[in-house]
Image (spheres, rainbow, N blue to C red):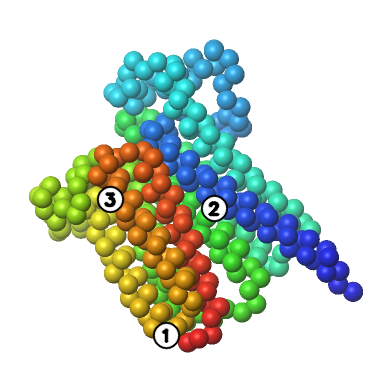
Amino acid sequence: MLNTNNLNKNNTHITIWLYLSLFLVSALIFIGGLTRLTESGLSITNWELFSGILPPLTDKKWEYYFSLYKQIPQYKEINFGMSLAEFKYIFWWEYIHRLLARLASLTFILPFIYFVIKKKFNFKQIVFYSIISLLFFFQGFLGWYMVKSGLISNTDVSHFRLSAHLLGAQIILSLLFFSILFRNTKKIYLNLYSYLILFFLIIIFFQIAIGAFVSGLDAAKIYQTWPLMNGNFVPEDVLIKEFSNSDSYSSPSHVQFLHRIIAYFIILIFSFIFYFLLKNKIVNSKYLFIVLLAIIFQVLLGILVLTSGYKIYIASLHQLGSIFLLFSIIYLFYQVSISQKY
């Protein structure tokens, strides 16, 4: 006879595991954004997978880490002469980011192994969660690969590698949220609207990637006006035809312009989605308005990032807003996919 109490208990444990993982990855993205905004990401120049779990506990150890930082271009060309106290400030941001990354990875992977041993998952679930586990490992590699790009000849990390690292974290976050929503769903009804929302989600991921370019190139520190850029919709140093050249994606002017254009495109695409879903009464309108509010919130924060002179707390809220936007779109997809009204 099936023991429903044990079944419910197992279900509760898995739910707690997934929500805790979701929270930790969200926090990791937020702290990662602050690490970038405070330009702290290069303060720890060694990989230190295990030895770096504990922070420096003696003055001698602090001096050691500081001496390593003094050898890289960022210190020599930008932060030359900084004090140990100033170094500690940027060190703590990167240390917390790395510690949280370890915690998030272990919080997901270790319980997953336990649940597999206890046969709590079917084959498809094992494959799905194994993919997420591998993505956690890959994220660790991407993080170090990103840091390496700023240790030899550059004063900062590669914005391409930064973008890949952020996108990887957002994909893990999205997969976790998908799992939470669909884990106990008996049947889904994929339809034209479902695929349209998935297409919209891909555009959001692309915008997040370009947003990382903006952050990595400090592109928000130029053209700090809206809606025009130096009095023009298309600034004088941006040529549309140059977007076919890969070099344009290393130009602060080009990536800021592209980030703006994609934002307008997102508003246009969602306007169509909003209209058709509302007209055909596919889902409750409140789910549409939640996504709409998330988009408006993001657009307003993006404008404030520029017009405020690139305030760190506004920029960090803008990144946090991307998480809320992803959640709202995925939840809309869930509601559409369990609806039979089509």
**Residue 280: which numbered mark, if any?**
1
How far apart are the alpha carbons under marks 2 and 3?
33 Å
Answer whether labels 1 and 3 touch (C-beta < 8 Å).
no
Tag 1, which secondary structure?
Answer: loop
Q: To which quarter of the image does residue 217 belong?
A: top left
Q: Is residue 69 left or right of residue 20?
A: left
Q: Earlier in the sequence, mark 1 or mark 3?
A: 1
Q: Nearer the viewer, residue 281 or 89?
A: 281
Q: Nearer the viewer, residue 294 or 170?
A: 294
- The crowd level at tag 1 (other Cα within 10 Å; few <14, some 14-19, many 20+) is few
Q: Position of residue 268 (x, y in %)?
A: 29, 69
Q: Amino acid at mark 1?
A: Asn
Indicate the quadrant containing the N terminus: top left, top right, bottom left or bottom right: bottom right
Please tell me whether residue 228 is drawn above or below residue 182 in the rendered image.
above
Name the residue beneath numbered marker 3.
303
Tag 2, which secondary structure?
Answer: helix
Answer whether labels 1 and 2 touch (C-beta < 8 Å).
no
